[in-house]
Image: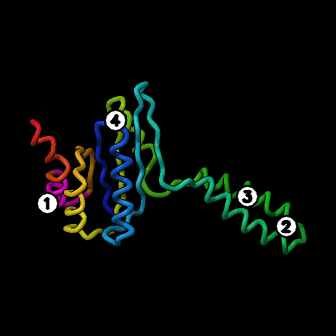
Amino acid sequence: MADLIAVAFDDESKAFDMRGELVRMQKDYLLDMEDVVVVTRNDEGKVKLHQAVNLTAAGAVGGSFWGLLIGLLFLNPLLGLAVGAGAGAIGGALSDIGIDDDFMKELGEKLTPGSSALFVLVRKATGDRVIERLREVDAEGRILRTSLSKEDEATLREVLERTRDKVA
């Protein structure tokens, strides 16, 4: 079972920085993320989702391959390539994996203009090592939602909100 973690940040860049750090942790095999999305709310109040994977492009590439293969079988590879790319792009645009977009947009509407949030769906993690790396990053944010256990949430909250407590 995956755990959802949503963290809000005071500006737009901090969520992108945190996503980059989480990707580095995944490359170091400290955690396994199913989905990671940055949500920003600009100064005009417009909410934008910054997905890590472009599903439309991925669908077009996969559709192109299968269309080309089927086109080769029926002696018209260019038509198969074009039809496959189009069908794959449509399928990719209509599919939604990971965290529900409507849920993220709903929480994004509650952000103050000029701020951001990071939504992470974690399959598994080496908790103590991830927390240790987060302490080094000095990431200041506040937890919006989580499905972690109470103990894990308290630890994460202590790491993310410690800088704010020092200033206050």
The CA span between labels 1 and 2 is 57 Å
Residue position marked by numbered label 3 in the rendering: 85
Q: Amino acid at mark 1?
A: Glu
Residue at left offset 23%, top offset 44% = 142
Please check the rendered image and state whether residue 151 is part of the magenta-colored stretch, yes or no: yes
Front disc: 4 or 1: 4
Mark nearest the camera among 4 and 2 is: 4
Q: Position of residue 53 (x, y in %)?
A: 52, 56
Q: Quadrant of residue 24?
A: bottom left
Q: Which is nearer the N-term, disc 3 or disc 1? A: 3
Decide whether the magenta segment is chiefly helix, strand or loop: helix
Residue lying at the far bottom of the rendered structure: 73
Specify the segment rendered in magenta.
148-157
Q: Earlier in the sequence, mark 4 or mark 2?
A: 2
Q: Which residue in the protein does label 2 denote?
A: 77
Q: Pick the residue in front: 95 or 156.
A: 156
**Residue tagged by mark 1?**
151
**Mark 4–mark 3 CB contact (< 8 Å):** no
For mark 1, give the secondary structure. helix
Residues at discs 2 and 3 in contact (Cβ within 8 Å): no
Report how far apart the C-alphas of labels 4 and 2 lie in the structure.
48 Å
Q: Which residue is mark 4?
A: 115
Q: CA distance from mark 4 to mark 1?
A: 27 Å
Q: Earlier in the sequence, mark 2 or mark 3?
A: 2
Q: Residue furthest right?
A: 75
